[in-house]
Image (cartoon, helix red, strand yellow):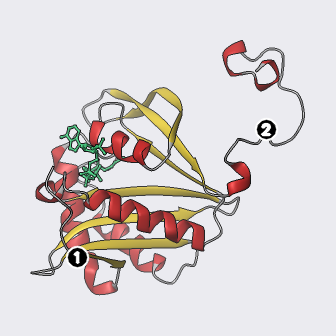
Amino acid sequence: MMPAVAVIVREMRAADVPAALDLLEEVAAEGVWLGTEPGFDRHRRGQYWLEGLADPTVSTLVVLDAAPGRLVGQGTVHVARYGVAELGMNLAADSRGRGLGGQLLDALLDAARARGAHKAVLQVWPHNEPAIRLYLSRGFVVEGRIRAHYRRASGLVWDAILMGLPLDPDLVDGSHGSGLPDAPGLPRSIRIADA
Ligand SMILES: CC(C)(COP(=O)(O)OP(=O)(O)OC[C@H]1O[C@@H](n2cnc3c(N)ncnc32)[C@H](O)[C@@H]1OP(=O)(O)O)[C@@H](O)C(=O)NCCC(=O)NCCS
């Protein structure tokens, strides 16, 4: 892998929106990495980002190649009111495999912590090896596989992998939450009480 290069990771500005939409179109057109598919509503997505600039629960970051200042990456974190930060990110094809994803992910996790999130979560396609390796390298664990879940434009229905990372140190060893025992009807493989 090539070494990480000088890039700037910073909060999105309104002027970045057209380039970020172009990037999303490019990555969506690859057809195999994102939930977003070609033909998505550019206006709606642009509005979501613009509204996010003033929303304290959202942070949208961009990655700029330092030399020409080209926008080569974008990531968003949205912290739900129950404290879980949902992440999404994408890089231009010619900017992958040189560590930029790690820089962007670290900045997104910082943004999630700064917004008080106790946990980060994301979904990834089961075949997306670069993304899964990146998330594992930052401590995310696979929490499950949702089967036959997402209907694609092709008509096929894809599985997705759920991954999570506790951000609150008190949760690192896991919390069983309510303290109430698991229902006996749950499969043994996921019953905490029997662990
Ligand atoms: C996923 C993504 C953000 C990762 O960013 P990146 O900068 O390319 O990641 P890195 O270069 O740090 O590589 C991450 C890991 O994948 C490995 N990797 C990179 N390219 C790979 C490839 N083509 N095949 C297999 N592994 C690959 C790297 O070696 C690294 O693993 P390691 O830490 O064990 O060495 C980026 O590839 C991307 O934007 N992909 C398209 C959009 C996408 O998939 N978004 C995420 C949706 S959940």
Helix, strand or loop under label 2: loop
Disc number for residue 18: 1
Q: Is residue 2 above or below residue 60?
A: above
The structure residue drawn at horizontal position 81% and vertical position 43%, both measured from the top left corner, is 177
What residue do we see at 33% from left, 44% from top?
A: 131
Label 2, ligand 1: CB separation under 8 Å: no
Amino acid type of the residue tagged 1 in the rendering: Pro
Rendering quarter of residue 67: bottom left
Answer left or right for 39 relative to 139.
left
Q: Nearer the viewer, mark 2 or mark 1?
A: 2
Q: Which mark is residue 66?
A: none
Relative to residue 43, is residue 127 depicted above or below?
above
Residue 79 or residue 106, whichever sits in front = 106
Q: Position of residue 106 (x, y in %)?
A: 42, 63
Image quadrant in which you'd find residue 53: bottom left
Residue at coordinates 90% horizontally, 33% vertically from top-left?
Answer: 180
* Secondary structure type for disc 1: helix
Nearer-the-camera pick, 12 or 193: 193
Q: Left or right: 63 with respect to 66?
A: right
Residue under numbered circle 2 = 176
Q: Split into 4 quadrants, where in the image is the C terminus?
A: top right
Q: Nearer the viewer, residue 100 or 152?
A: 100
